[in-house]
Image (cartoon, grey):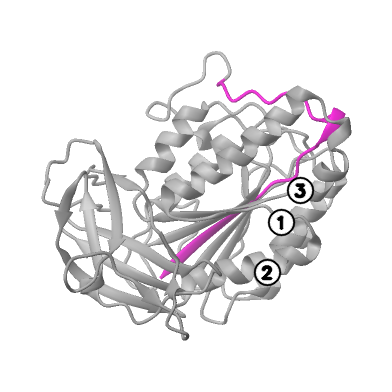
Amino acid sequence: MRVFIVVLAMTAVAAVLPPQDTNAQPGAQTPSTQKPSETPPAEAGGPTGDVGPIAVPRKKSEPPPLKEPKVKNPPEIGNYSVRKDVSLVSLDVQVKTKDGNFVPNLKPENFRVVEDGVPQKVKDFKVQDDVPITAVLLVEFGSTNYYFMVDALRASYTFANTLKKDDWIAVTAYDMRPHILVDFTQNKDEVYDALGRLRVPGFHEFNLFDSLYDTIDRLERVEGHKYIILVSSGLDSFSRLRLDQIYDKVKTTRDITIYAVGTGQFARNISDQYIGSIARMSLLQGDNQLRTFAKWTGGHAYFPIFAANFKEVFADIAADIRNEYVLTYSPTNAKQDGTFRKVKIELQAPDGGKLTLKNEKGKDLKYDIIAREGYTAKHEVE
């Protein structure tokens, strides 16, 4: 079962954009003492005209809502577990040509896994081919610029159109804090209805770091691999968490992959001559943050310029997540010491040398290996 989270952001550009501060406000608590979800309720007027999460009544066949800390999984999905053990490390690996095509027919012996410079033995090998997914669409809905809002909503609907009948999706919007618009569902109409509620934002603030932390924290209670598709400017107004804290949270996730889709690129291009140096630096920093979130979790960042590009982007994401190799190994370093273990994956030939791929004309084929850069050796039981 695959879980996606899509984070959509609508932000301002040009002179409207104030410098973004990635530092926490005075008196901010660290994640260990107070999570973003514990922040005081915001004033009414959020994306739904109400305060707090909105939960759609769910049937027994639906997976658990993100807001519930501990629930049993429905029979169709399998049993959820709150236990996470580093004794087995599972990696989703994409092997793609330079043209973006999936490289099929690779065998377990073609993969070489190295953790902190030490070769590891692959114990389990699977090919994910068109598997069902579970998606959470997280929409940043605090904006002062119309074009950013249109881009984010267009991206949301485009993503929803890629879903298949066996896929699960939930929709959450965030401004100063996240709001659950629809719980996990297989009904696209419920997704469209949730997106249809996003018309006039109640706030101009968008606390990306706090909202992303809160979403990851909830998803970590779900066993199996999950995905976050982050459609965002990457900017943050005044989250209580600092940039280094959300980076740490992203790096320590083990079963969540983030795909980032930047918004407002067209508006930024046409207004570039009017953007001041401080605002431009903030926008570039936002782009870099999106790339970092994706890179550290084995995903990819996209920055579409035109409306037509959104369809291409989500088709590429759908192809990636439905066509992967899954490698599982037991690390030689069994210590649960909370350290970050760097992982590198290579393709090797039967003789142990680098694997060379050929195209139909017999010419060497260049390829990329996409996987998360490592994991945190941490054992948790809740």
Q: Is residue 113 visible?
A: yes
Which percent across, then down, holds residue 50? 73, 45
What amino acid type should be assigned to the residue bearing mark 1? Pro
Density class for disc 3 (Cα within 10 Å; few <14, some 14-19, many ≥20) is: some
Reading the image, the residue beneath label 1 is: 304
Reading the image, the residue beneath label 2 is: 312
> Is 92 left, or right, of 275 in this rendering?
left
Magenta stretch containing residue 247, yes or no? no
Residue at 52% x, 29% y is: 243
Q: Which mark is residue 265?
A: 3
Residue at 69% x, 28% y is: 281
Circle 1 SS class: loop
Circle 2 SS class: helix
Residue placed most toward the observer, 357 or 32: 357
Q: Are marks 2 and 1 in contact (CB under 8 Å)?
A: yes
Q: Is residue 184 visible?
A: no
Extreme residue in the top direction: 26
Residue 163 is drawn in which quadrant? bottom right
Of the residues under marks 1 and 3, which one precedes in the sequence? 3
Which percent across, then down, holds residue 277? 76, 24
Magenta stretch containing residue 17, yes or no? yes
Density class for disc 2 (Cα within 10 Å; few <14, some 14-19, many ≥20) is: few
Segment tinted magenta in the rendering: 1-24
Q: Are marks 1 and 3 in contact (CB under 8 Å)?
A: yes
Of the residues under marks 2 and 1, which one precedes in the sequence? 1
